[in-house]
Amino acid sequence: MRIAINAWFWNSPTTGSGQYTRRLVEHLSAAEPDLELMLVESHGWGSKVSRFGSKVSGRLQLETRNLKPETSDLKKVWFEQVIFPRACRRLKADVAHVPYWAPPLASSVPTLVTIHDLIPLLLSEYRGGPLVRLYTALVSTASRSAREVVTDSEASRRDIIVNLRIPAERVRGVHLAADERFAPTRAPEDVNVRARYGLPARYVLYLGGFDVRKNIARVLAACRRAAPVIGEDCPLVVAGRLPTEDTPFTPNPRRLAQEYGMDERHVHFTGFVDDADKPALYRGAMAFVFPSRYEGFGLPPLEALACGTPVVGSNASSIPEVVGNAGVLRPPDDTGGMADALARLATNADFRAELSRRALAQAARFSWERTAQETLAAYRDASA
């Protein structure tokens, strides 16, 4: 079977779509050696095609037009709607896979699209200006003509069926997985990582984005409320580069911490964290707190579980699917419930040990091998 993959994000491995594309291609190739995977990348106003897993790499010369320089957004839409489907046709692909929410309106090749979430459609803060809303309308309409839709969770699957009005039999949930680097065994360099970021011996960890749906204010409020029980020897560690502007969309956690009366005894800001250092941060944490209001999947809590770290978080969207019984989940605004859970984890060693055991069992249910096999099944159904 010959699969053409939209590789717009292939060279952006720090993005979620880039990570997903690379990990999926790697494991698809291992799962099915005879599968022919062709990465179609943007090349000017045309494309470049590479065959993954072999030394053969060639360029597919497509019709180009003498257009004046336009915005990168226009080039991206042109690639998604014109260049990519044209390349799929010339490559005689059996299936065209778009690994993010941007399927072509028209394609002569059966199309499979991965829709990670419907954030721009469901959350008003993320709808953007007129051009963003127009793009969301375009890809929403185009998704209805896709032969198969893959999404990261059953929660997102329900959202897609209801909001995009796509028949349920054409939408399947295929869970993601954590990288193998996220494991409970402490590495020798963990001590150096902890020293580099100035981490204490015990701490509660938040690692994630700072946009409004991540609910960072609730992280700070819950930890401040739990502080009298937990004690100053187990502060909150907020990991990641902080927002450059303090806005309603990206509230600055430093300002929020001041409003809650939290100083360096209660909260420590690490700044940017190198991706290679993240497993050590998870492994060293007493608990991982993640009260997000909406996630298409939620990799950070799964990464924490894979390191044996219990999760205290919200019961919203896909998070219960990811965490299962390996954490304590409360409504996103239940500050008291999350604070009580953190306090119990900090003071009850048996409770924490039990959740840590469950964390490893829950994380073992997810693997990229399984993701690849279920995606292969979707390819077969799309090409049938």
Image (tube, rainbow, N blue to C red):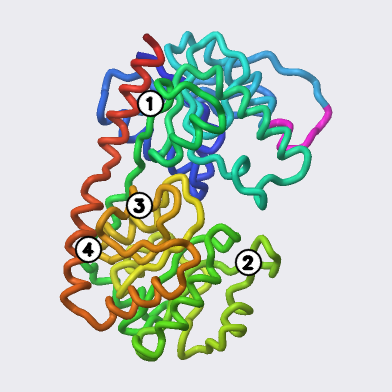
Label 3 and label 2: CA atoms lie apart by 28 Å
Q: Is residue 35 above or below residue 343?
A: above
Q: Is residue 342 left or right of residue 109?
A: left
Q: Is residue 61 left or right of residue 187?
A: right
**Is the C terminus in the top left, top right, bottom left or bottom right quadrant?**
top left
**Which element is circle 1 on?**
loop
Q: Position of residue 19 (x, y in %)?
A: 44, 44
Which mark sits nearer the N-terminus, 4 or 3?
4
Q: Residues within 10 Å of mark 2 (few under 14, many from 20)?
A: some
Q: Position of residue 8 (x, y in %)?
A: 56, 33
Residue flagged by tag 4: what amino acid is it? Answer: Pro
Label 4 and label 1: CA atoms lie apart by 36 Å
Q: Is residue 283 left or right of residue 226?
A: left
Q: Read off the residue under disc 2.
A: 243
Q: Is residue 158 above or below residue 57?
A: below
Q: Residues within 10 Å of mark 4 (few under 14, many from 20)?
A: many
Q: Residues within 10 Å of mark 1 (few under 14, many from 20)?
A: few
Image mark for residue 320: 3
Which residue is at the far right? 68
Report the magenta residues as a range: 68-75
Residue flagged by tag 3: what amino acid is it? Answer: Pro
Residue depicted at 48% across the width and 59% down the height: 292
Q: Read off the residue under disc 4.
A: 184
